[in-house]
Image: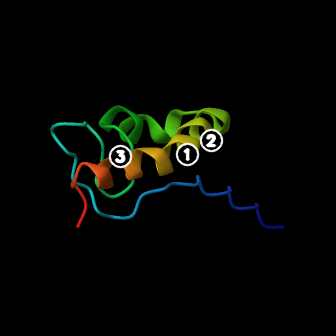
Amino acid sequence: MTTPRPTPIASPCKKVCAVDGQTGLCLGCGRTLREIGSWSSLTPEQREEVMQELDERMERLQSLGKLG
């Protein structure tokens, strides 16, 4: 009998890891360094809360001219 593999943690990472100094947000995914560093230890509910904010954060970065 095989042991089931754990479900991978969902992540918004786009492999573009560059944090904007003005906003403190990653230009790839919109998370803060603190959120990125603690992602694997957050509860699914905490990760979902952050995920709900990311579209707005990315729009903010776009409006500030931070994204290409």
Q: Quadrant of the N terminus?
A: bottom right
Q: In the visual, does 68 lie left or right of 10?
A: left
Residue 23 horizontal side relative to residue 40, left or right? left
Residue, far front: 63
Q: Report how far apart the C-alphas of labels 3 and 2 lie in the structure.
A: 19 Å
Q: Which residue is mark 3?
A: 60
In the image: residue 19, left or right of residue 56: left
Residue at image mark 1: 51
Among numbered discs 3 and 2, the one appearing first in the sequence: 2
Query: Amino acid type of disc 1?
Result: Met
Q: Are marks 1 and 2 in contact (CB under 8 Å)?
A: yes
Q: Position of residue 35 (x, y in %)?
A: 41, 36
Q: Residue at image x 35%, y 32%?
A: 34
In the picture of the structure, the residue carrying the numbered disc 2 is 48
Q: Is residue 18 above or below residue 24?
A: below
The residue depicted at 26 percent of the width and 56 percent of the height is 17
Q: Secondary structure at mark 1?
A: helix
Q: Secondary structure at mark 2?
A: helix
Do callouts 3 and 2 mark residues in contact (Cβ within 8 Å)? no
